[in-house]
Image (spheres, coloured by chain):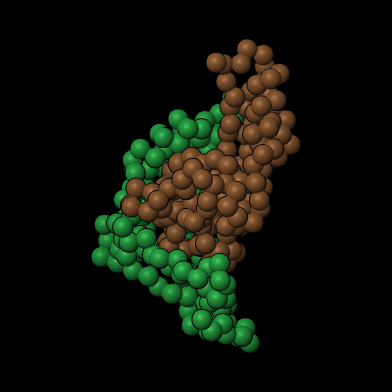
Chain colours: A green, B brown
Amino acid sequence: VTVPTPAAEEPPAGPITKYRVTMRAPAGFDVDGNPLWHQAVDYVHDAHLAAYVADARTRWAYVGVSDEPDAGPGGYHGAYTLPAHLDHPDAGQYRPPTPGSEAERLLLEALANPSEAEPPPPDLDFTPDPNAAARADEEG
Amino acid sequence: MAIAILAERNSLAAKYATDAPNGCLFTGASSGAADPGTTGTTTTEVTTTGSPAYARKAIGGNWASATASASAVTGTATFDVPSGTTVYFAGVAVSATRGTADLRDYAAVTAQPFASQGTYAATYTYTQT
């Protein structure tokens, strides 16, 4: 893997079309009786939001979508992978980081690290586990 | 046998936190990939290919101070997760360095496949009976 040197300028960014999706599931109570949560935050293109949120609601107790567009920490140029099991024509689609962007450079840098020799495979065979949350609760 | 004395339950719960102060996340589960297993290896730990890169995180709360109360230690750690990753398990480990084979325990959490670079905040609780 050849890691490019940092570009002088980032490629131009277009309008942000992702929205922040916040998901929470109960994880018991603390010693004072306050509820505890697991929380995942992801950033999803508006065209995929309906399918993504419908799927997330099969596992998470709460799923909320931001009012304003938000590209998240990956930024406009970051990689994007629509989970393959979603009910959407784009399901399984992988969009790599924008060529020449800092996001691309950082990905190549990580892949050049011997401990990361295997690139992260898009998860194409994800099967939602409806019992995961209950099992997690039981196991604490 | 359950322990009758609260002070001893608190002592053992604090020991659990002291032994494994760092949280970590794992991929792989019902889709055919292996779960973390019981030997302490971490071959399915989330990769560092995102930005910010995934790293093990110190667990907060009274887990960090190892001061158990009511027989329990509890804390939260928030992880950066790269696009294309599905989180299935949260674990506790000795080292703060990703990939170190010193996993001490793990449990299934609510699974989530990430479309973009995102975050997963896992809450850890250990209760000594």
Q: What is the quadrant of residue B50 in the picture?
A: bottom right
Q: Nearer the viewer, residue A65 or B81?
A: B81
Residue A76 in view (yes/no): no
**Residue located 68% across and 32% down the image:** B15
Residue A56 in view (yes/no): yes
**Residue located 31% across and 57% down the image:** A125
Residue B85 versus residue A137 in the image, above or below: below
**Residue located 43% across and 63% down the image:** B84
Q: Nearer the viewer, residue B50 or B91?
A: B91
- Residue A106 location in percent, x, y? 57, 74
Q: What is the quadrant of residue A135 in the picture?
A: top left
In the displayed structure, does residue A61 sit left or right of residue A30? left
In the displayed structure, does residue B111 sit left or right of residue B122? left
Residue A104 versus residue A126 in the image, above or below: below
- Residue B103 location in percent, x, y? 57, 46
In the displayed structure, does residue A51 sit left or right of residue A117? left
**Residue located 40% across and 73% down the image:** A95
- Residue A88 location in percent, x, y? 27, 61
Question: Furthest-top residue in view?
Answer: B4
Residue A7 versus residue B99 in the image, above or below: below
Question: Furthest-front residue in view?
Answer: B39
- Residue B13 location in percent, x, y? 65, 28
Q: How many marks?
A: 0
